[in-house]
Amino acid sequence: MSASKRDELVQRALQAFYRGGFHAIGMDRLAKETGVSKTAIYKHFRTKEELILATLRLRDEQFRNWLMRRVEALAPDPRDQLIAIFDALAEWFDEPEFKSCMFIKASSEYQDRAHPIHATSAEHKRLLAVDFTERAKKAGAKDPDKLARELLIVKEGAIVLAHLHDSRRVAKDARQAAETLINASFNN
Amino acid sequence: MSASKRDELVQRALQAFYRGGFHAIGMDRLAKETGVSKTAIYKHFRTKEELILATLRLRDEQFRNWLMRRVEALAPDPRDQLIAIFDALAEWFDEPEFKSCMFIKASSEYQDRAHPIHATSAEHKRLLAVDFTERAKKAGAKDPDKLARELLIVKEGAIVLAHLHDSRRVAKDARQAAETLINASFNN
DNA sequence: CCGCACATTGACTGATCGGTAAATGTTAGA
DNA sequence: TCTAACATTTACCGATCAGTCAATGTGCGG
């Protein structure tokens, strides 16, 4: 199997897991949905867990890349970018395929902190916080770390509730909350 | 089986699902962990899904009851109670058994909005929002509904991140964010 | 055209899934 | 003490779980 075929497999596995859940999607069904036979899959991944980890690495890269680029496209100024995070989020929520966050779901199914899947999810959130901190720093916030962590909390809460309630309403509320927190981080 | 035995079964099933996840815990293992044979379980619940729904109803009642009472014990004044939500949350995060929120995990595994388990999770969050709104109204907030929804977002985000990162740190950040949002809801 | 290397397959493993049925207690009224 | 009613257990159902293997392509250097 070529590298591009492997990437394609991981991409399709990602979609299957995202739509169906990790425990709920078996390897047989995965083979059917990806079009790659089970044996071929196991040529490249020793276990289901390794395949899941590969999908999470891909998702981490895709999501953070998308968010960063989208935020920068929406606002040139770093401080406005902090708010633009929540405009980008609103766009995501509006996609018909939106089904919460892959990493929240992964850590919901693999709860042990020592588990690689849980750890990978934690790392994804940490990298988001790093990115937020960078922007908060550039914007000149009093305590960029704290503001970044607060915005991350709002982002995660918004994702959870967008999955359960009216996502448009949630996106608006999250944006307003973020604005309030950002303003407070400059005025005080 | 008496009513109290049934309650005991649901309580133990709740703990098993909370610790292990819904798909991951099978009925055989559940029978072993609850001490109630599989056939006996199926005398009271037609399907695994019905048992899960029973655990969620119990959890909803337990959690909201606990939070309400704890918040009222921590602060007499409605406005202080809004902040006390996050002190109570901090206590919860500090419990060694803390493993995120049962309903976030349930909606992570049952993603379809039409699914009863998903709907029950959404309803739990809605009832929390109602309670928050009541307190915000009593406290005299400008827009009690909006403040309640903002605080709910912060609460859910805090739970998710407390499960992934340093829960003490997250609890502090969430409390401060909540304070900022509450103050803004009175000053403007 | 041959033969080797590698990719891919369907069929299979034992274990476990959710759920059921027949058999075996256990209890209580007559 | 006999028996009817109910609770509980053991054993089982077909399906699916993660993972494996022998067999069958398939492409390529000689």
Image: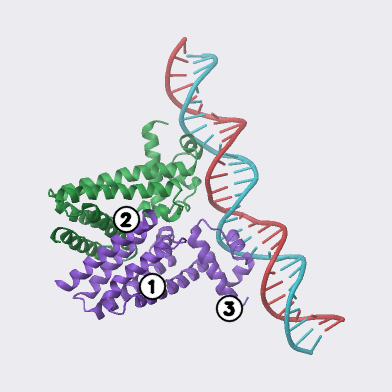
Chain colours: A green, B purple, C cyan, D red
Q: Amino acid at mark 3?
A: Ala
Q: Tell me residue B90's x, y (percent).
A: 36, 64
Q: Amino acid at mark 2?
A: Phe
Q: Are marks 1 and 3 in contact (CB under 8 Å)?
A: no
Please give the residue where the numbered disc 3 appears in the rendered image.
B3
- Marks 3/2: CA distance? 42 Å
Q: Tell me residue C12's x, y (percent).
A: 63, 41
Q: Amino acid at mark 1?
A: Leu
Q: Chain of mark 1?
A: B
* Marks 1 and 3, the one that precedes in the sequence: 3
Q: Residue at x 20, y 54 (%)?
A: A143
Q: Quadrant of the C terminus of chain B?
A: bottom left
What secondary structure is marked by label 3?
A: helix
Task: From the viewer's perspective, tell me whether residue B14 is left or right of residue B167.
Answer: right
**Above or below — where is B177 with respect to B2?**
above
Q: Tell me residue B17's x, y (percent).
A: 50, 62
Please tell me which residue lies in front, A140 or D22.
Answer: A140
Viewer-nearest of labels 1 and 3?
1
- Marks 2/1: CA distance? 31 Å
What secondary structure is marked by label 1?
A: helix
Which quarter of the figure has residue A58? Answer: top left
**Above or below — where is B102 with respect to C1?**
below
Q: Which mark is residue A65?
A: none
- Marks 1/3: CA distance? 26 Å
